[in-house]
Amino acid sequence: MPKGFFNRRVEIMATATNDLVTVFYYKGMGGGGELTLPDGRVFHWKSINFWGNKWAWLEGTDNDPVIGFDTGGWFRARADLTFDEDADFPALLVFLGWYLHTIKRQETAAATAVVVT
Protein backbone atom coordinates (compact mmCIF):
# COMPACT_ATOMS: atom_id res chain seq x y z
CA MET A 1 0.00 0.00 0.00
CA PRO A 2 1.17 3.51 -0.67
CA LYS A 3 2.01 5.43 2.48
CA GLY A 4 1.97 9.06 3.44
CA PHE A 5 -0.15 12.01 2.42
CA PHE A 6 2.31 14.85 1.89
CA ASN A 7 5.33 12.56 1.47
CA ARG A 8 3.81 9.76 -0.63
CA ARG A 9 5.88 6.64 -0.96
CA VAL A 10 5.80 2.88 -1.52
CA GLU A 11 8.00 0.86 0.81
CA ILE A 12 9.51 -2.36 -0.58
CA MET A 13 10.08 -4.96 2.13
CA ALA A 14 11.95 -8.28 2.12
CA THR A 15 9.37 -11.03 2.62
CA ALA A 16 11.64 -13.33 4.63
CA THR A 17 12.89 -10.75 7.13
CA ASN A 18 10.36 -7.92 6.76
CA ASP A 19 13.33 -5.54 6.45
CA LEU A 20 12.98 -2.38 4.39
CA VAL A 21 14.81 -2.91 1.07
CA THR A 22 14.13 0.41 -0.64
CA VAL A 23 11.49 3.13 -0.99
CA PHE A 24 9.80 4.56 -4.08
CA TYR A 25 9.04 8.26 -3.57
CA TYR A 26 6.34 9.96 -5.62
CA LYS A 27 7.40 13.25 -7.22
CA GLY A 28 4.67 15.80 -7.88
CA MET A 29 1.02 15.09 -8.57
CA GLY A 30 1.32 13.14 -11.85
CA GLY A 31 2.20 9.75 -10.38
CA GLY A 32 5.87 9.71 -11.36
CA GLY A 33 8.66 9.24 -8.89
CA GLU A 34 12.08 7.97 -7.98
CA LEU A 35 13.49 4.67 -6.75
CA THR A 36 17.01 4.38 -5.36
CA LEU A 37 18.27 0.80 -5.12
CA PRO A 38 20.56 -0.40 -2.31
CA ASP A 39 23.47 -0.47 -4.81
CA GLY A 40 23.00 3.28 -5.40
CA ARG A 41 21.41 3.15 -8.85
CA VAL A 42 18.53 5.58 -9.34
CA PHE A 43 15.50 4.87 -11.54
CA HIS A 44 12.80 7.39 -12.44
CA TRP A 45 9.18 6.40 -13.14
CA LYS A 46 7.73 8.82 -15.69
CA SER A 47 4.89 9.23 -18.11
CA ILE A 48 6.49 9.44 -21.54
CA ASN A 49 3.58 10.72 -23.60
CA PHE A 50 0.91 13.43 -23.41
CA TRP A 51 -2.00 11.06 -22.74
CA GLY A 52 -0.40 9.35 -19.75
CA ASN A 53 -0.89 5.82 -21.05
CA LYS A 54 2.81 5.19 -21.67
CA TRP A 55 5.10 4.98 -18.67
CA ALA A 56 8.73 4.00 -18.33
CA TRP A 57 11.57 3.40 -15.93
CA LEU A 58 14.54 5.62 -16.82
CA GLU A 59 17.93 5.05 -15.21
CA GLY A 60 19.81 8.04 -13.81
CA THR A 61 19.76 11.05 -16.14
CA ASP A 62 19.30 8.90 -19.26
CA ASN A 63 16.07 9.59 -21.15
CA ASP A 64 15.99 6.20 -22.88
CA PRO A 65 13.49 3.82 -21.24
CA VAL A 66 14.94 0.76 -19.54
CA ILE A 67 11.44 -0.72 -19.35
CA GLY A 68 8.41 0.77 -21.10
CA PHE A 69 4.77 0.16 -20.16
CA ASP A 70 2.18 0.87 -22.86
CA THR A 71 -0.95 0.67 -20.72
CA GLY A 72 -4.60 0.61 -21.65
CA GLY A 73 -7.83 -1.29 -21.39
CA TRP A 74 -11.22 0.16 -20.53
CA PHE A 75 -12.61 -2.81 -18.64
CA ARG A 76 -9.43 -4.53 -17.50
CA ALA A 77 -5.91 -3.41 -16.87
CA ARG A 78 -3.27 -4.41 -19.40
CA ALA A 79 0.19 -3.32 -20.45
CA ASP A 80 2.56 -4.15 -23.27
CA LEU A 81 6.12 -4.09 -21.96
CA THR A 82 9.25 -3.21 -23.90
CA PHE A 83 12.72 -3.87 -22.55
CA ASP A 84 16.06 -2.33 -23.43
CA GLU A 85 17.96 -5.52 -24.20
CA ASP A 86 21.31 -3.94 -23.26
CA ALA A 87 20.12 -2.63 -19.90
CA ASP A 88 20.87 -4.28 -16.57
CA PHE A 89 17.87 -3.85 -14.29
CA PRO A 90 16.26 -5.78 -11.44
CA ALA A 91 12.98 -7.64 -11.98
CA LEU A 92 11.62 -5.47 -9.15
CA LEU A 93 11.09 -2.70 -11.72
CA VAL A 94 8.60 -4.83 -13.67
CA PHE A 95 6.53 -5.64 -10.60
CA LEU A 96 6.73 -2.16 -9.09
CA GLY A 97 5.80 -0.57 -12.43
CA TRP A 98 2.70 -2.75 -12.69
CA TYR A 99 1.81 -2.01 -9.06
CA LEU A 100 2.14 1.76 -9.64
CA HIS A 101 -0.04 1.46 -12.75
CA THR A 102 -2.70 -0.43 -10.77
CA ILE A 103 -2.67 2.16 -7.96
CA LYS A 104 -2.97 4.98 -10.52
CA ARG A 105 -6.03 3.28 -12.09
CA GLN A 106 -7.67 2.89 -8.67
CA GLU A 107 -7.01 6.52 -7.73
CA THR A 108 -8.36 7.73 -11.07
CA ALA A 109 -11.51 5.60 -10.68
CA ALA A 110 -12.05 6.90 -7.14
CA ALA A 111 -11.63 10.52 -8.25
CA THR A 112 -14.03 9.96 -11.15
CA ALA A 113 -16.64 8.44 -8.81
CA VAL A 114 -16.40 11.46 -6.50
CA VAL A 115 -16.80 13.93 -9.38
CA VAL A 116 -19.76 12.04 -10.86
CA THR A 117 -21.71 11.80 -7.58
Image (cartoon, rainbow, N blue to C red):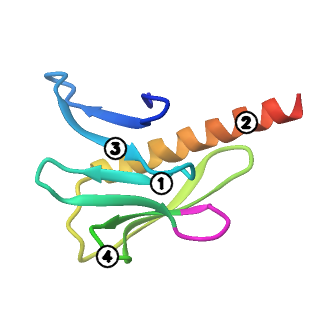
Q: Earlier in the sequence, mark 1 or mark 2?
A: 1
Crowd tier of the residue under label 1, counting other residues whose Cα lies within 10 Å: few below 14, some 14–19, many 20 or above: some
Where residue 87 sits, quadrant-wise, is: bottom left
Q: Mark 3 and mark 2: span between their CA atoms?
A: 23 Å
Q: Residue furthest left?
A: 39
**Residue 101 image position (x, y, % from top left):** 53, 47
In the picture shown, does residue 84 fall above or below 19?
Answer: below
Give the magenta range.
Answer: 48-54
- Residue 24, which numbered label? 3
Q: Is residue 104 magenta?
A: no
Mark 3 vs mark 1: which is more N-terminal? 3
**How many callouts does the rendering have?**
4
User: Tag 1: residue type?
Assistant: Gly
Q: Secondary structure at mark 3?
A: strand
Q: Which residue is mark 1?
A: 32
Q: Are marks 4 and 3 in contact (CB under 8 Å)?
A: no
| Callout 1–callout 4 Cβ contact below 8 Å | no
Label 1 residue SS: loop
**Could you say where residue 93 lies in the image, as x and y percent from the top left?**
33, 52
Number of other residues with Cα within 10 Å of mark 4, as a class: few under 14, some 14 to 19, many 20 or more: few
Q: Nearer the viewer, residue 109 or 95?
A: 109
Measured in 3D between alpha carbons, the distance from the residue under mark 2 to the one under mark 4, in whole angstroms, is 33 Å
Look at the numbered discs 1 and 2 and tell me whether their residues touch, using CB distance below 8 Å. Answer: no
Q: Is residue 53 left or right of residue 89?
A: right
Residue 111 marker: 2
Q: Please determine whether, in this image, residue 91 is positioned above or below residue 117.
A: below
Mark 2 neighbour density, 10 Å: few (under 14) some (14–19) many (20 or more): few
Amino acid found under the numbered disc labelled 4: Asp
Q: Tell me the quarter of the image containing the C terminus.
A: top right
| Cα distance between the residues tagged 3 and 1 | 10 Å
